[in-house]
Amino acid sequence: MTAFALDWLNLLIRWFHLIVGIAWIGASFHFIWLDFSLRARPEQSDGVLGTSWLVHGGGFYHVEKYLVAPSTLPDDLHWFKWEAYLTFLTGFALLAVQYYWNATAFLVDPTVLPMTGGEAIIFSVLFLLAGWLSYDALCRSSIGAHTGWLAFSVYILIVVAAFVFTHVFSGRGAFIHTGAMVGTIMAANVFNVIIPNQKKITTSLLKGEAPDPKLGKIGKQRSLHNNYLTLPVLLFMVSNHFPFLYSHPTSWLVVALIVLAGGLIRHFLNRVDAGDTPQSVAWALPVAALALIVTIWWTAPVSIAPSTKASDADVLKITQTHCVMCHQANPTHDGFKGGEPPKGVVLDTIDGIKKNSAQILVQAVQGNAMPLGNETGITDKERAILGSWIASQ
C-alpha cells in the first residue's frame, strides 16, 4: 500500500507541476513576444515606450508599455509570480518524492561515487543553491553588462554543472539535477530579482517618487534569460524516460548540445518576434539542427553481435541476482514493495525476459539505467552476456 500511495502522490504532484509549469512558460512566451511586438505610434500616451494590438477569442486588445511606469497605478494591478513559485515548489516536491525518497536507487551509483542516500540529498540541495548563487554572481558582475559574454558564461556554468553532476550522481540523477538547477535559477530570478524590483518601482510610484529605470532593465534581463532556458529545461525534466540521454559515459556533452539547440531555437523565434527578418537570423536554425543531429549520433546505440555463448540459465541467473527484486509479480525492493513491478515488466522467467528484451537492451546493456543506481553491482561482463543472449535470439 505504501508503494501505491507513493505512486498516487507522485502522480498528483506531477500533474500539478505540469499545470503550473505550462502557465508559467506560457506567460513567459507571451510577455516576451508582447515586449518584442511593441511599436511606437503617434497616438500613444505620454511616457509610453510602445503599444501592441492583439486579437484573440473574438476580441481586440490594446496594450501599452511605459518607459518606466505610469504616474498612477490602479487597485487591480495583476502580478505574474505564482506560476513561477508553484512550479518550483511542486518541482522540488516531485524531486523529493521521486528521487529523495529512494535516493540510494535514483541518485546514487556506487561506480560513479560511493555515498549514502542522505549524502546524495545533501549534495543535491547544496548544488541547487550553488547553481543559483553562481548565476546571480555572474549577472551582478561586470560580465552582466555584456549580453553576449553573459550568455556564454551562463552556458558554460550549466555545462560545468552537468559535468560535476555526472561525476557525483547516477546518470538519471545527473540529468534531473541539471534541469532542477536551471529551474531553480529561473524561479529564483522571479522571486529574488524580478518581483522585488517591480515592488520597488511600485513603492516609488505610490510615494510620488521617480522609479529607478535600472530596476526594470534588470528585471527584463532576467526574464529574457528565463525565456531562453525554457526549451532545454523542459527536455531535462522528461529525460528520466529516455535512458539513452543520461546513460552515455559523457552525457554532460549531451547537455551542452541540448542547451545550445534549445537556446538557438528560442533566439530565432524571439528575433523574428522583435521584427528581424527570418532570413537575418535563419543561421540559428541549421546550427540548432546540427546540434540535435550530433546529439542523436552521439547517443546512438552500438550494435551488439553475439560474442560468447550465453545460455538461458546464464541469463536467468543474472536477472535473479540483479532484476527480479523489482521486476516480479510481487516486488521485494523497498521502493516497490506492496505495489506493481515498474512499468509492469516481469523478468523472473525466460518468456518474460524475451518479451521485454528490447527494454533490457536499452536500459541495461546499451545504457546503465538499470539496475537503479546499480545497487546490486551488475558488472560489465554480465551486461555483455545479456547483450550477447539478446542478439542471438
Image (cartoon, rainbow, N blue to C red):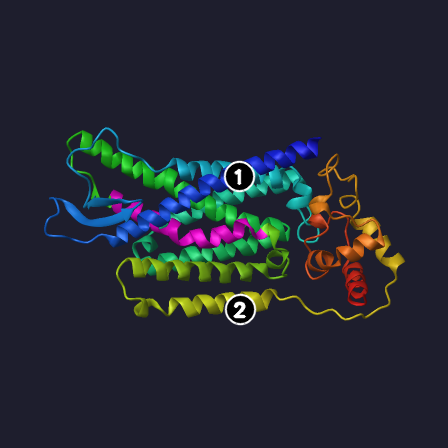
Q: Quadrant of residue 276?
A: bottom left
Picture quarter with the C terminus: bottom right
The answer to whether the residues at label 1 and label 2 have Cβ atoms under 8 Å apart is: no
Label 2: element kind: helix
Predominant SS of the magenta segment: helix
Per the image, is 233 magenta?
yes
User: At label 2, which amino acid type do we have?
Assistant: Val
User: At label 1, which amino acid type do we have?
Assistant: Trp
Residue 109 place in picture, x, y as percent:
68, 50
Give me the disc on residue 15: 1
Residue 83 place in picture, x, y as percent:
41, 38
Q: Decide if residue 302 is in sight here.
A: yes
- Compute the Cα span from label 1 to label 2: 33 Å
Q: Is residue 225 left or right of residue 17?
A: left
Q: Which residue is mark 2?
A: 294
Picture quarter with the N terminus: top right
Residue 73 place in picture, x, y as percent:
20, 33
Q: Earlier in the sequence, mark 1 or mark 2?
A: 1
For the point 79% across and 39% down, which residue is it? Answer: 330
Residue 329 place in picture, x, y as percent:
79, 42
The boundaries of the magenta stretch are 215-239
* 227, above or below 393, in the image: above
Looking at the image, is mark 1 or mark 2 nearer the viewer? 1
Q: Is residue 239 left or right of residue 288?
A: right
User: Which residue ends up furthest to the front in the rendered image?
Assistant: 58
For the point 17% across and 38% down, which residue is it? Answer: 70
For the point 60% across and 54% down, which residue is it? Answer: 166
Circle 2 crowding by C-alpha within 10 Å: few under 14, some 14–19, many from 20: some
Which sits in the foreground, 53 or 259? 53
Q: Decide if residue 140 is in sight here.
A: no
Which sits in the foreground, 132 or 100? 100
Per the image, is 178 magenta?
no
